[in-house]
Image (tube, rainbow, N blue to C red):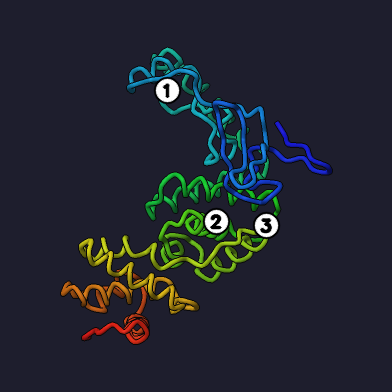
Amino acid sequence: MVIQKPGSEVELDEITACPECKSEHLVRDYNRGEMTCSGCGLVIDDNFIDSGPEWRAFDAEQNEKRARGGAPMTVMVHDKGLSTDIGWGNRDTYGNVVPTKNRAQLFRMRKWQNRTRASTSADRNLALALKELNRLASKIGLHRQVREEAAMLYRRAVNQNLVRGRSVEGVAAAALYGACRRCEVPRTLNEITEASRASKKEVGRTYRYISRELKLNLQPASPVVYIERFCKELKLPGHVENAAVRILNQAVEAELTSGRGPTGVAAAAIYIASVLYNMRKTQKQIATTVGVTEVTIRNRYKELAENLDISVQA
C-alpha cells in the first residue's frame, strides 16, 4: 500500500510526517479506515487496514482460545515478526514431546531457519542492532514506546545509508538517546553511554550526525523533566518537587537556563527547594544522584538565587 504523489512513492509503514505541513501528529482512525494529519486535516490514506483482531477477549483464557494467528507486527524484530520462528521447546503443534530420534532433524531445521531469516548483511546488521537496542533499554529501564521509537530511528538511518563505517553499538546508543529525547524520557547521555559498549564521544558524534541527516529538529532537553525522577531517588516529598518545578519555570521565564546543562540546573533547583522546606540534602548527595559535580551545583544555585531573589543559607 503506497501513497502516490507527483514524482514520489512512499510506503505507509515509513510515514512519520505529513507530506503537506510536515507535522508528525498523525491520527489513525481504524473505524473509518483513514490516516489523517491533525495539523492540516489532510487524509493521507483512506483505505487504512486494521491489523488487529476482529474479536474481543476479556481474560487470558479467552484470548488464548480465540487467537488464530501469530504475534502482531513489530519493529523490534528485523523482519517485523513476519517470518516463522521455530521454538526451542521440542514439542510439535499438538503439544506432544518430539521423539528423540527426530530431534536432530528438528535442530537442523531450526538452524537453517535462523540462517534464512537473516540471509543478507543488511538483515544481520539490523538483527544485531535491535538486540543491542533491547539490551540497552532493559539495562536502563525504558518502556516499550521508547524502544519502538529507537528501532524506527535506526531503520531510517539504515535506509538512508547512515550506519556505514560506524559501529553498531554507537549507532544503537545514539538512536536510543534520540528516542529518549523525542519521547521526553529523562535519560542523560552519560547514562546511556555507561550501559553501552561505545564511548561517550562516539555516541555523541553519531547522535549529532543522524539527528542532522534525519532532520529530527529536537529542542534542548528541559530541566523540568528530570525533577520528578531525581526527587524520587533523593526521597524528597511532593511539595519539594513542586517547589523545584516552580523555581525552574521562573528561571526559564528569566532566560537563566539558556546555555546551561539541564541536569545541572535541575540539581540546583532541587537543592534550593530542599533548603527552603528544611528537607536539606547535601550538595554531594544531589551531585552523586544527578551525575554532576558539586561545583556545577554551587554555580547554578548561586545564579538562580541571585537572579530570582531567593534567600538561601548554604
Quadrant of the rendering where the C terminus is positioned: bottom left
Determine whether, in the image, residue 93 is placed left or right of residue 281: right
9 to 193, vertically: above or below: above
Q: Which residue is mark 2?
A: 175
Q: Residues within 10 Å of mark 1 (few under 14, many from 20)?
A: some
Please name the amino acid that badge 2 sits on.
Ala
Q: CA distance from mark 1 to mark 2?
A: 37 Å
118 to 64, vertically: above or below: below
Q: Which residue is mark 3?
A: 162
Q: Residue at x 44, y 28 (%)?
A: 88
Residue 192 rendering spot, x and y as whole percentages:
44, 61
Please name which of the two marks, 1 or 2, marks the residue nearer to the observer: 2
Q: Residue at x 31, y 84 (%)?
A: 309
State whether residue 210 appears in this view.
Answer: yes
Q: Residue at x 67, y 33 (%)?
A: 45
240 to 157, vertically: above or below: below
Label whose residue precedes the other's in the sequence (2 or 3): 3
Q: Nearer the viewer, residue 101 or 67?
A: 67
Label whose residue precedes the other's in the sequence (3 or 1): 1
Please name the amino acid that badge 1 sits on.
Asn
Q: Residue at x 47, y 56 (%)?
A: 180
